[in-house]
Image: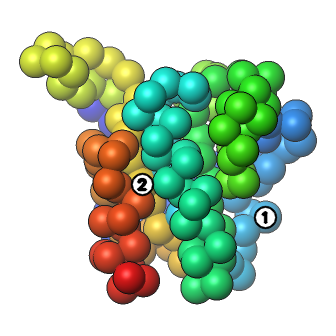
Amino acid sequence: MTERLVPGAVAPEFTLTDDAGTPVSSGDFRGRKVIVYFYPAAMTPGCTKQACDFTESLDSLQAHGYTVVGISPDKAEKLAKFRERDGLKITLLSDPDREVMKAWGAFGEKMMYGKKVTGVIRSTFVVDESGTIEHAWYNVKATGHVAKLRRDLGLQ
């Protein structure tokens, strides 16, 4: 089982490729609050709902100083199609070897339809301006999660 992050922990560093093939590093976000979320697969119903919810809330989140980054194991080409198909405005990053997911505790054993499987654990983190985890949620639901996140952050 991958170790889970808790509030107060230093967010693990990463450099991943975005949907345009450009490297993006966690250090690029220093000095800003960032919402990092991990999802299993682009263009699936739940992941699409979650990405669209983040996109719809992006202006409000940005007004409160938050940047949103979604990370999945999908290749950059698939992420580009996902962005285009659904008009997504959030940053999408590719973690095909799942190393960043493992470092953040977002890949490992989980229950799916009553069976234990190994895979991406749908998770969301709020990282402060200095790179410290403020909030860590694991096994979140795709539908309704962004609204709950906004409530938890006092943004409603």
**Label 2, label 1: how far apart the Cα atoms are:** 19 Å
In the displayed structure, 152 sits above or below 93; it is below
Earlier in the chain: of badge 2 and badge 1, it is 1
Q: Position of residue 118 (x, y in %)?
A: 32, 18
In the displayed structure, 104 sits above or below 131; it is above
- Judged left or right of residue 36, residue 134 is left
Tell me which corner region of the image, top left, top right, bottom left or bottom right, holds residue 15. top right
Mark 2 highlights which residue? 124
In the displayed structure, 90 sits above or below 77; it is below
- Element type at mark 2: strand
- Element type at mark 1: helix
- Judged left or right of residue 112, residue 31 is right
Tell me which corner region of the image, top left, top right, bottom left or bottom right, holds residue 8. bottom left
Three-letter code, disc 1:
Asp
Three-letter code, disc 2:
Thr
- Mark sitting on residue 28: 1
Of the pair 15 and 35, the residue shown nearer to us: 35
Tell me if residue 70 can be seen. yes
Label 2 Cα crowd, 10 Å radius (few <14 / some 14-19 / many 20+): many
User: Residue at 34% of width from left, 55% of height from top?
Assistant: 145
